[in-house]
Each structure stands twice: as C-alpha cells, then as structure tokens.
Amino acid sequence: MQIMEKNHTLLIDNGTISSDDISSAFNNSNVIVIKAAQSQHLAVDLQNDELKKLSSGTKKFVLLTLGSTGTPKGVVLTIEKLMQSAKLFSQWSQITPASRLLCLAPISSMSGLRAHYGIALLTKCHLINPDSDASIFSLLTLIENQHVTHIIAGPPFIKQLAMLLSRINPQSLSSLQYILCTGANIDNVAVSKIYQTLKVKTLNYYGLTESYGFCIAVKPDDFNCDDTAIGKAVSGVRLEIIKPDKNNIGSLRIHSRRLFDQYLGQEKHDKTFLDTGDFARIDNAGNVYLHGRVDNALKLSSTELIYPIKLEEMLSSALTGNQVIIYALPSGYGAWIESPLSLLDVTQSLKSALPGKYIPNEIKVVADLSLSPLGKIKAINEEANV
C-alpha cells in the first residue's frame, strides 16, 4: 500500500511491494518510509518535522524496525550505501543476471529491502516473490517450478526444510545453489542434512539494519557444516570485541563507513563504529561466534547468567527437536513450546533431561508455534495447557 504525504511517501508492506513501486515513489518524494503492515510504529506521525528536513536532501529510506532487539526506531538509510551493501552481498553470494532469487524476507526488513530494490536493480536477476502466508510445501513447489538458484531466508525455513528431506526428490531442487540465512545462529545438524541430501550450501550472514544488514558472512569456500561461526568480516568492515572476558567473549563492535545516517528524530549518527548489542567471540582466523544479546541475558535461580538462544537450544534438544521460544519474566523466564504432548509430559521430559536451574518458571505448550521465515512469531494456534 502506498500513501503520498507532503514530505514523504509511506509504503506499508503487506507483501505486494515491488522494486517498481519504490522507483515510482521516488519520482514523487525524496524520502520513502517503509513499515510492516502489522507494525504499530508511530514514528511517522510523531516525527513529521524530521521527515520534512530529510526531504530537502538526497533520496533516502526510513525503515521502521519492529523493535525485536529494543525500542522500535526509524532508521534513516541512503540509497548510495544500500547499493554498496547490495553489491557486496551479490558478489559474496554469486548472484548474477542468470540467478533466480527467492526472497522470504519482507521488504520492510533490511534483507528484504536490499534484495527487492538494491540487488534487483544492480544484478538484473529474476526476483521471485512468494505469498506472504506460503507454507513450506508451496515454497518447495515454487522453488522447483521457478528453478530457484538462491533463497534468502531465516533459521525456521532451514529447520523445516531439513525435516522434510526424506520426502523430497533431490532432482526436483537441482537448480538450487545457496540458501542465504540471516537472523541468528543456525542449526548445524539441519545445515549438514541439507548439504548431504541436496548438495546445497547454507551460508550465514549477519548485520543490523543500522549497518545495512551485511557485516559478517560465511564465504562459499569457507562453508563447513560442523562450524557454528556466523562468518568473517566482509569488505569495509573491521570487528572489535569490547571488554572480553577470560574466554575472549565480549560486546561486538562494528567499524565501518557503511552505517546508517541517523534515527528519525535524533541527531545525525556521525560515528564510524556501531555497538551491536551482541556478545561474541572472534577466533584467530577471524571467525565470529555469537553468544547472545548484551541486554537480554537471563538470570537463573543459581544467579548464573545465560542467553535465550542457549536456553532454546538446550530445551529443544531435551524435547528431541521441538520448537522453543524463550521470553523473560520479572523473575526467571518462560518458554513457548510447540508439542503434541501435554504440559505435564513436557515438564516431566525437561526435568528428567536438565538440571532444575534450567527449567522455565512458566511453560506454555501449543500445537503450532508459527514463525515467519526470519524467525519472528507470526501466530500462536490452538493454545493448550498454559
């Protein structure tokens, strides 16, 4: 949906925005604001004076984040730096005019905006847009029929694909070369199964919206099913670990000229570094390993600090791979768990497999924990045993 305003054009991402829509909007405005249809972000209304200031300069995007790692913000981005990110991304992932790219990231995300606008314009590749509510089965049919070569997705897609491998004829996906994964650490068991069955490499990449979404990546030649690294610094990026502990784990800082201009309504960002808010470790070869968010560590009853991603891995393993999503409570933490079992059975399974300090203070068992392709919770269906 496109809404023309005095100082900007607002694009509401309902799954139908194309690169042509963005190009058309730039014919009428210097500033394009993009928000997800489900977002309740009020920055456009609250900061209209700031949008007026932006409209007097060069063409820019304002991407309204959903705030999954903090308070929702309007991140001001330039076309020039977006295209730089698109060029690097295309070179890294070997996207050419002959490529057929299936992007599961919405255009209101950094990965989606770069693909639908930057990569599409730069490489002239064939961009394939799925339905916003497409199931894994319809996506597999789409990949086969459209001869997809590259997929941009998140960890949930990879996990679903790995679970269905026994039902897939590898020849039906023979065109597929790479799955480009963004969002978080990924399941290396799933990555290994996909490679062994389909001979398709799953390449992880990392970057916040403020850094144009591409700072660290696993190169195709460095692909290793057994390595949990999220990659190495890409061109134009230098990494630093702030205040490392005895295990060399500390706060990850990115040094780059390819950073956002400012947050809407705030002063211009004139620094050449960005504190990511992630704890990480860098080995001697430059490989980066994530260890959780600086601001969302959870304190267990033992006073031990632990990060949600680690807890999710532990609980999922104890439940033979069931999907788990952790959330913080005023005291301790809770967990959404996708399982056909009863609350009692799930609780007993966890208690028999894990020390008491790791058992959630609150457990909610659901039949279907629906996640977006990038790992966001879309819906919770058939809630039970809460």
Image (cartoon, grey):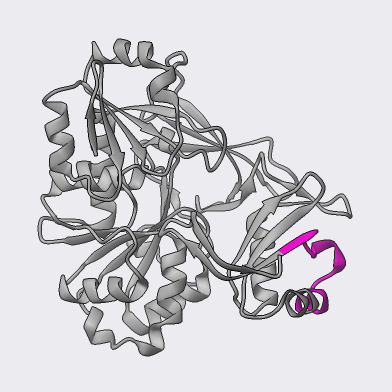
What percent of the width, then of the height, locates residue 303? Answer: 87, 49
Task: Decide: is 195 above or below 242.
Answer: below
Question: Seen in the image, is 268 located left or right of residue 149?
Answer: right
Total numbered labels placed on residues in the image: 0
Could you say which quadrant of the image residue 181 lies in? bottom left
Would residue 191 be seen by someone viewing this image from the given angle?
Answer: no
Q: Quadrant of the C terminus?
A: bottom right
Could you say which quadrant of the image residue 158 lies in? bottom left
Question: Seen in the image, is 249 located left or right of residue 237?
Answer: right
Q: Residue visible at 25% across and 48% down?
A: 115
Q: Residue visible at 45% across and 32% down?
A: 41
What percent of the width, then of the height, locates residue 94? Answer: 22, 57
Question: Seen in the image, is 211 located left or right of residue 281?
Answer: left
Residue 358 magenta-highlighted: yes
Would residue 146 be seen by someone viewing this image from the given angle?
Answer: yes
Task: Decide: is 346 above or below 81.
Answer: below
Q: Residue visible at 47% across and 16% down?
A: 266
Magenta region, residue range: 349-363
What percent of the width, then of the height, locates residue 263? Answer: 44, 23
Q: Residue visible at 22% across and 45% down?
A: 17
Q: Quadrant of the N terminus?
A: top left
Residue 72 magenta-highlighted: no
Task: Decide: is 213 above or below 302.
Answer: above
What percent of the width, then of the height, locates residue 382? Answer: 56, 69
Instruction: Out of 225 and 103, give the one closest to the viewer.
Output: 103
Question: Seen in the image, is 318 located left or right of residue 136?
Answer: right
Could you say which quadrant of the image residue 144 lies in? bottom left
Instruction: Out of 344 and 225, give the one closest to the viewer.
Output: 344
